[in-house]
Image (spheres, rainbow, N blue to C red):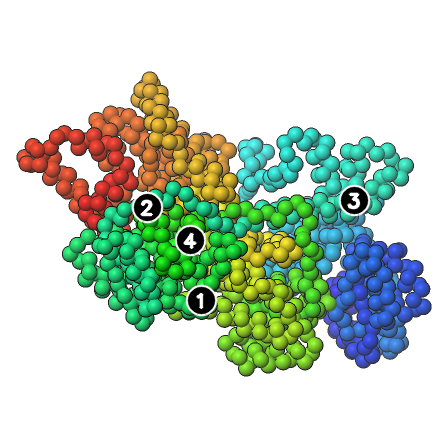
Amino acid sequence: MGEIAAAHIAGILDLPDACHLITARATLMAQLPTGGTMTAIQAREDELAAEVEESGGTVAIAALNTPDSTVISGQADEVARIAAGWEERGRKTKALAVSHAFHSPLMDPMLDEFREAIEGLSFRAPSVPLISTLTGELAGDEIASPAYWVDQVRRAVRFAPAVARAAERGGAFLEIGPDPVLATAAQHTLSEPASGRERPEPLVTAVLDRHRPDDEAFVRALAEVHTHVRSSAIGWARLFPDDPAPRAVDLPTYAFQRQRYWMADVTPPESAAGGDASEERFWGAVERGDLEALSDTLRLPDGDGQRASLGEILPVLSGWRRERRERSAVDSWRYRVTWKRLTGLDGGTPSGPWLVVAAGGADGWADACGRALGEEAHRLDVDGAVDREGLAEWLRSRYADGAPPAGVLSLLALRDGPETGAGGAAGTLALLQAMVDTGIGAPLWCATRGAVSVGDSDLLESPAQARVWGLGRVAALEHPDLWGGLVDLPPGPDGLDAARLRAVLTGTAGEDQVALRANGAFGCRVVPSPAGDGEPGREWSPEGTVLVTGGLGEPVARIARWLAEGGAERVVVPDPGGTDAPGAGELADELSGLGAELIVARCGPDDPAAVKELAGRLSAAGARIGMIVHAPAPAEPGPLAELAPAALEAFPAEDVGAWRRVGELCGMEPDEPAVCFTSVAALWGSTGQGAHAAAGAHLDALAGPGRPEGVVSVAWGAWDVPADTDERGARGADGLRRQGLQPLDPRLALTALERVLGNGDRRIAVADVAWDRFAPLFTLARPSRLFEDVPEARRAIEAARGPSDDEAADRTAELRRELAAVTADERAARLLAMVRTDAAAVLRYEAADAVDPDLPFKDLGFDSIAAVGLRNRLRASTGLRLPATVGFDYPTPRALAGYLLGRVLPEESGTGHAAFGHVEELDAALAELPLEDPRRAGLMNRMRALLWKYEPDSAASEAGDGDGEEDLAAASADDMFALIDRELGT
């Protein structure tokens, strides 16, 4: 079909004649009897020639897709016999899902009638050079005849030779079609060494890509051609029909400025330090498949056969090398949760009365926790649904005239049953929202029972309560000052160790995710979990029928292709739209080409009749389900303060159970995998993802110890798929990268999943985390020990903390001496140079001169993440404690340098006292606090009190002891807020 389209473009056929040829060809083929088959075999044409000849004319070579992938076609039994022989030799084979054995002797009955049907067409010599896929050579006059097109039906498609021949003419390969199909095969062919010739590898790209908007994909392809092919002459003006002379923008003049603007492509060396240059050249040549460079590295002589022998194994060696590097990358993405035994929990003393909030059925726990927190603990019993407004009203009335509680312990999660129930999570959300509404500044701790497991022998009894853990991890990021933490209680109230509970709740333990057990307390940790250098425990591949839930979106479509490529015979996707769902037809065609059937069933887990009908249909067809992939779409994002309780009412466990019953009705064994896709938001939180994190934590708990075998949970980082093509989606992906979470290549993500299943992992996280960026941001507003056992994260957090107090004081003193020794102008210049240097490092500029001293940081490209990076660098350079917003409080490098000068040498700014540096901090703090924040009012009240205290005619001033200025000078901004909190209870 593609060659017929090319013949029309080349002027061989006009459009009506080309359409007539296609119609006649398709009609006559459809009238042939079925019964033949086609199979792709990992072998060259010459390797298959003898067996095809021995078939007695029942099998033929049908296509040469790549140099080592050949398709045979013909009678089904003979094709199967030949394929089985190659499988025994360790070669890959793939039966194609086709209706007829095309390009084989089974096409012969239609040839004469086809010739008669196209005899009357008008053929012309090509006006544009055309490479024939019938011969693999430049087409001549023979293509302008009916005989050629009859042969094209019967003989092999020589795609790989045609690509190799076209490559000799240089230029680029541009696939024209709705989605890349042939580009991969062409790239494979072009990566093979050209025998005896040197040539640059041509560009291979596609005009359209269904994963991108058409206009974006089209312009991107043109830009690639423009930049890779010097001879290209693209009429860019036609993209601007309303402007006959569109303005062109010059690129940086590198030849004169000698400054590189693009990020360098850096591949870290895989080997340890000490590898020599020859070794690097060797592996570089292997990865490129460069036979000549490899032979030169090994100093192989020409003409003695050694180079030819090396060429035969080079593709295998190159593939092995690529596989090892990909495996290493995938290994670096793997993490798991573990629990670390905590020591030194000697108990703590509550600083005041606590509030215990409990629901019906938790009386024993409420009594035990109340006793642990002391006789002064208050208790609020909630019956029925927990209401945000009702809770807020109770809190206002209870604490209107007195100090707020020292802390709040919620037992609302204990109302949920072991398997189902969202009341605990919804109640926890309502309590959190009520505390936000009323401004109660006490830390909120939430207790569960059996929601987590600290080891294989610690059974996870209440997966439904795990939803509160997902919700709480988001709350820690969105409300760091209000959130206390999560604690999972021991089996019964009688086994509660009161001292341990007090140590956790009062902060003595320094942990905010704790499990209390009879044998001790355990803190939650995320740790690396590489699969190791060895081979997986077993080779895993999908078999039979696979059920993939979640609807026919982009991630599910990619999973379906992966399953088909791996050997699945049938992929079943429930979707409310059924076969009318967007993309269903196209995906079915793709999977058919891969040898698999796609069934899109119009049903969902909330429609038992439709689910039962699907199970019956599959069972009647003999489809045995061997695997389920549960890939639910993420919940709509939104901050917890605005989240409706209904957003937490989805029951992922019930959905998983419903589809598992379908599998059982279709022969699925208990130990066969049911893979639950969750998100790392459930593991460590993500702002705006409260509902998604809660549901994900519930799913993850289904794979915990004591749960049914076969369930596997994978907590994914974001996939690099176009889930959202609008500007908001693009900003979201860019924001993840800036935070240190690189979206995963879906192909490698599915490779990771294959390894998870091969290793027998049950709970794993897969995320590409740049810890040097992610860890400091994660702990910026609230310390956490969750990542302290990830070496890269621990180093990054320690570096972000800056120097110790002694080191910082020494650095500030040293800087003060340096500045005191030079003139006033030189002092200002040195500090400005320091600010520009640190700003350039954050922005990854090559030189500090690139930072305009009078341009606002926002205009230089700073966002909140970059501002934190600048603060950290300046803190290390000066030893000063600086707010994270310092880059916005003093908006230009020159203004910031002036502020630093006043902090290091107060006399230079005319203040005359070091305390004025802290006045600047107070100014910055007031600027960043919202008007409704109670801390703002408290801070202003405290400042008014200080002014009154030290007025000359104030009695308080006369009674003072003169230490106020020293106290203020020594206090940090955090100290000041703590003082305000203690004195004013805000």
- Calculate the distance from the C-alpha at mark 3 to the C-alpha at mark 2: 65 Å
Label 4, on which residue?
518
If you read the primary sequence from the N terminus, does the residue marked by circle 2 or circle 1 appear first? Answer: 2
Label 1, on which residue?
418
If you read the primary sequence from the N terminus, does the residue marked by circle 3 or circle 2 appear first? Answer: 3
Foreground mark, 4 or 3?
A: 4
If you read the primary sequence from the N terminus, does the residue marked by circle 4 or circle 1 appear first? Answer: 1
Q: Position of residue 666 (x, y in %)?
A: 64, 75
Label 2, on which residue?
347
Q: Looking at this view, is 55 or 720 the one in front? A: 55
| Residue at x-position 19% and y-position 45% | 983
If you read the primary sequence from the N terminus, does the residue marked by circle 4 or circle 3 appear first? Answer: 3
What is the secondary structure assignment of the residue under circle 3? helix
- Calculate the distance from the C-alpha at mark 3 to the C-alpha at mark 1: 57 Å
| Residue at x-position 87% and y-position 35% | 302
Foreground mark, 2 or 1?
A: 2
- Calculate the distance from the C-alpha at mark 4 to the C-alpha at mark 2: 16 Å
If you read the primary sequence from the N terminus, does the residue marked by circle 3 or circle 1 appear first? Answer: 3
Label 3–label 2 contact, CB within 8 A: no
Amino acid tagged 4: Ala
